[in-house]
Image (tube, grey):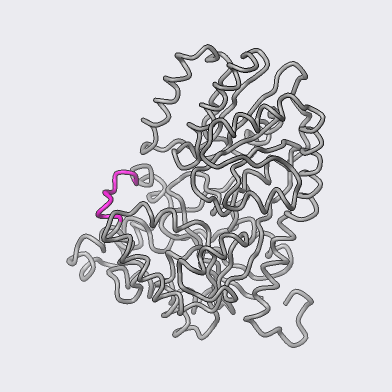
Amino acid sequence: MKIAYIAAGAAGMYCGSCIHDNTLAAALIRRGHQVTLVPTYTPLRTDETCVGVDSVFYGAINVYLEQKSSLYRRLAPQSLDWLLNKPGLLKYVSRFSSATSARDLGELTLSILRGEDGYQRKELYKLIDWLEETARPELVQLTNSMFLGLAHEIRRRLSIPVICTLQGEDIFLDDLPEPYRSQAQELLRQKASDVDGFVAPCNSYADFMSEYLNVSREKIHVVPLGIELGGHGVLPRQRTDETTTIGYLARICPEKGLHLLVAAFDLLVQRLGKNRLRLEVAGFLGSRDRAYFDELVEQISRSTWQDRFRYWGEVDREQKLEFLSRLDILSVPTIYRDPKGLFVLEALANEVAVVQPGHGSFPELLEKTGGGRLVEPGSVPSLADGLQHLVENSEERMRLGKQGKKAVNELFTDEMLAERALTVYRQYVAPTIGGSRDS
């Protein structure tokens, strides 16, 4: 099968969606399929070998200039357009992305959702020309619903099915100021009819997005996450009976709930004493959230347990595996209904039990893996109670970790992800006569 997967760079940071898209594309390629992973906005950054093409479409600089300048839209030469889409330049300027105002971001979001009627129509036509002449896919998959504006022209020009993944973009849209938020949701509902089907990582998010996009639930297929297991669960456990190490592995931002974990850890120290506990934190910190993190660090510096805290910074794959080998418990107490939770699978793959809020993807993940405990979302006392239970019950903690590892190795691998995705694709692409079993 020939698949073009339109992915989105995350302005230079490790991103769960980028990692998921790359993991799926790589697994499909290993099965003999021709997958073209197409970066947009900025180059993709994953902690695995990237299989994306060495080009960027909808380059962030061109997209922004087309939004702001009618003169640029009409007169920019192709040579300048090519230069501004160079991956190296886009990687460099992505560090300044947080300076974009909420109003600019809202107007840009609406324009891209308008597709051929938006200011970035030239970018759309360049992408479709390239798909038609170079990739020649049988199916196109869009990484999230923010790309629904592309679907109509892709289907019209290429006469092939278009699938759209749903990966938590409602969280981004809900942060837009009015009137952009309402206008964007209305556009999404209009454009949703331009795709053949949707893919969601869990049932709860499929149910939610069915209502959010006003589409039939039957049009949304559930394809659970999978991870590439290379290196996971291999390093020796760097843990002791005397100290329980609690970890956080996610982007540093209020939405992921690090402040809740810090408050719960402080409560645990009051109950159990600091010498039994450690708090280890790893994840990308952007300029937008630096003040938030600095305030937390200041709180910790005034606590009695400042010497029991460590921030690793952003970690690559090797560092991530080392980080996980040091943990006894992982908790990322998101304040939003996270539809993915890739960090849960990564922790469990290393026999690390998890304590997560009982919303979003987490109830389904823990039901299928048996690798942790659920607590009341947004509640510091409930989070502290859940953590304390596993701190004081090491045998149960280890049992949950082992159950979780077994389940991830059986149910949540990249190969399982690829097979489940293919099951969806086969509903839209007729099998090739005489092709392989996976065609």
Asked if residue 242 is positioned above or below residue 109 in the image, the reply reads above
Asked if residue 134 is positioned above or below residue 40 in the image, the reply reads below
Please identify the quadrant where the C terminus is shown: bottom right
Residue 253 in percent (x, y) is at 45, 38
Residue 349 in percent (x, y) is at 74, 43
Choose top left, top right, bottom left or bottom right for residue 186: bottom left
Name the residue at the bottom extreme. Answer: 433
Number of callouts: 0
Please identify the quadrant where the N terminus is shown: bottom right
> Is the magenta region chiefly helix, strand or loop?
helix
Does the stretch in magenta take in 98? Answer: yes
Does the stretch in magenta take in 273? Answer: no
Residue 252 in percent (x, y) is at 48, 36
Which residue is rendered at x = 46% and y = 15% of the image? 301
Front-most of residues 421 and 340: 340
Which residue is rendered at x = 71% and y = 31% of the image? 325
Asked if residue 30 is positioned above or below residue 175 in the image, the reply reads below
Front-most of residues 386 and 64: 386
| Residues in magenta, as a range | 97-105
Which residue is rendered at x = 41% and y = 38% of the image? 286
- Give the side of residue 181 with respect to residue 30, left or right: left
Choose top left, top right, bottom left or bottom right for residue 157: bottom left
- Give the side of residue 303 with respect to residue 435, left or right: left
Front-most of residues 48 and 426: 426
Name the residue at the left extreme. Answer: 71
- Give the side of residue 305 with respect to residue 176, left or right: right
Residue 326 in percent (x, y) is at 69, 27
